[in-house]
Image (tube, rainbow, N blue to C red):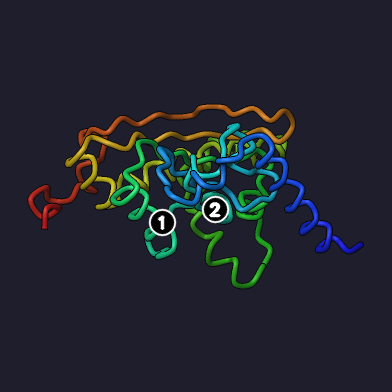
Amino acid sequence: MSPYEKLLIQNKAWSDDQKQTDENFFGRLEKQQSPKFLWIGCSDSRVPANQITGTDPGEIFVHRNIANMVVHTDLNLLSVLQYAVEVLKVEHIIVCGHYGCGGVGAALGHQNLGLINKWLRNIKEVYKMYQTEVDAIENQEDKVNKLVEFNVIEQCQDLLKTSIIQKSWKARTAPIIHGWVYGLNDGLVKELVNIEPDLKNINPIFRYDLDELDK
């Protein structure tokens, strides 16, 4: 049996188990999607949002990319963000990084990796901001993990710089922004930052004109 065939068999077993546990599970899932959370996480296969949080499908709206980045030229991320905030009206956004992140580790180096160089440059900008603190750490693993934390904090800040978040904060005082880091070695989440929906929490230079946000 190939690994691909095994996936199909496991899917059928999972579906059967869900139906036995709750015969109405898929009926409810089919009819509505009303998650309270948007998850912006890393593409790493070891960091699945639902398993980490013990939630069912439909409870978390998920976007994943390399190193859980909020890049203002990424139309995929911005489209997900707008849909989650304006249509689904999520109450919380979680930016979740993970210790030992390969993308963050690569951003600390100088290897030419081709197209991904352009993506990693965004992480290098975070490194530049915190270079003194990161370079003071001798152990390479600890150095990467500290940059992982700084990167999560800065991605949360980048969310605040979007008109999507600012418009929602003005209109409905939501969502709250959370920064997490997940430990691959123990499966536990560390909270780094919680940002309440208050326009005063946004650096004035990044604030949009409130009247213009209504247009």
Is residue 103 left or right of 159 when viewed as pictured?
right
Hey, what amino acid is under mark 1? Val
**Residue 161, x across and y down, in percent:** 30, 49
Q: Nearer the viewer, residue 27 or 75?
A: 27
Image coordinates of residue 149 in percent, x first then y, are 54, 36
Would residue 102 appear left or right of 156 to someone viewing this image? Answer: right
Dot 1, how many residues are within 10 Å of its Cα: few (below 14), some (14-19), or many (20+)? some
Residue ID at (52%, 47%): 27
> According to the image, label 1 marks what residue?
80
Q: How many labels does the image show?
A: 2
> In the picture, which quadrant includes the N terminus?
bottom right
Helix, strand or loop status at disc 2: strand
Q: Mark 2 points at which residue?
A: 64
Work out which residue is located at the far bottom of the displayed protein and give it: 114
Instruction: Decide if residue 195 is on the left or right side of residue 22.
Output: left
Residue 10 in the image, given as x and y percentages of width and height: 78, 51
Q: What residue type is labelled 2?
A: Arg
Above/below status of 151 relative to 180: below
| Quarter assignment of residue 5 | bottom right
